[in-house]
Amino acid sequence: MTIPRVDLPADARLDTLAVREGLPPSPWGENSEALFITSSFVHPDAATAARRFGNEEDAFVYSRFSNPTVTMMERRLAALEGTEACIGTASGMAAILMLVLGLLKGGDHVVCSQSVFGATIKLFQDFARFGLEASFVPQDDPGAWRAAMRPGTKLLFAETPSNPLTEVCDIAALAEIAHARGALLAVDNCFCSPALQQPVKLGADIVMHSGTKYLDGQGRVIAGALCAPEHIVTGKFVPVMRTMGLTLSPFNAWVVLKGMETLSIRMKAQSERALALARWLEEQPAVERVFHPGLASHPQHALAMAQQGGQGGAVVSFAVRGGRAEAFAVIDAARVCSITTNLGDTKTTISHPASTSHGRLTEEQRLAAGITQGLVRMAVGLEDLADLKADLQRGLAKLG
């Protein structure tokens, strides 16, 4: 037995794959993908069960590590990212944990951007107790990445654009640095999604996702994934999943699966709104600086446009004149934006990174990453742009 594939043209394009890739319909002929809520699967006889549990026969066995709905989501995301395989996980952080558990051991060394999500930094730091070493370097300086390499370096981990300052790294340059020393490059593609950026086409080996964000797109579920070559997924990650159970639930997989159907049009619309809002923010006297890759003022604007299909993404951060109190004043004046740290929603969200998403870091670590107390992050949704401007103007007007 082999799990069948959808019969699609070999040259099917991204938007078609986002709607059609997965598994063929069941014998009932449903047009919308089925949701398989079951913990286990029945086998015709004991010998068949033995073969399936021994990986001698391709079949669904137990939903901790194999489920049709999860497989549909994995196949669709792998197709969009252009990788051979994908494995879904319970969350984005679970995906990074699987990356560590599947590929690294005590004595290994990781080079990571100092600008990544705060919990990612904490995870790599916490593994020091097991002998894993990590060095944190400026996101946009390939020379710093190269200088940080050691004989024991096994993995480079980047997030581009970064959270929350939208710093962009040169994926091709980092891939060259990693591969020259026999290491792998993993890229967190959460901010762009494959609708804007496919890191493997630029040389990355592994693409990490928090499906909670743009893949779902409506703030409904927690999910994660790793997209990689087949031999890494089956040889390194699946054994971790079977043993440790970092399992993505079928329902959450189904929500993400359906979310990907509108990914491309959402990312385009939200990116356009974000760029327009960023340009407006640059004109506001109470704003010191605006961070968005689509702006000509962004330090890596040209690189971002080349890597991200000419779009800057939907996240905008800006520093207000003053500090924490002034940032809080802008956030608290919001009546349309949701005060929450999640992003990727059709509803615009607004947050204060220094006290929320990056609150567990030391002030020294935050400042090294450029995260000041006056920084505000917005993940722009699909509301009317005039309403978003008015929402921010209420707070900015209080700053004089």
Image (cartoon, rainbow, N blue to C red):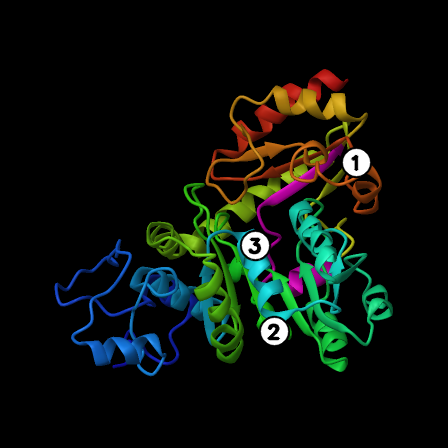
User: Distance of mark 1 from mark 3, alpha carbons?
Assistant: 22 Å
Label 1: state its secondary structure. loop
The magenta stretch spans residue 20: no
Q: Position of residue 213 (x, y in %)?
A: 50, 48
Q: State the residue position of label 2.
A: 205
Does residue 381 appear left or right of residue 163 in this picture? left
Q: Residue placed at 45% from the left, 46% from the top?
A: 217
Q: Front-most of 320 and 121? A: 121
On the rendered structure, is 144 left or right of 103?
right
For the N terminus, which image quadrant?
bottom left
Q: Is residue 58 above or below residue 395?
A: below
Number of other residues with Cα within 10 Å of mark 3, as a class: few under 14, some 14 to 19, many 20 or more: many
Instruction: Give the magenta part as a residue range.
Output: 301-319
Label 3 near label 2: C-beta < 8 Å?
Answer: no
Q: Which residue is mark 1?
A: 372
Type of the residue with mark 3: Cys
First reached walking from the N terminus: tag 2 or tag 1: 2
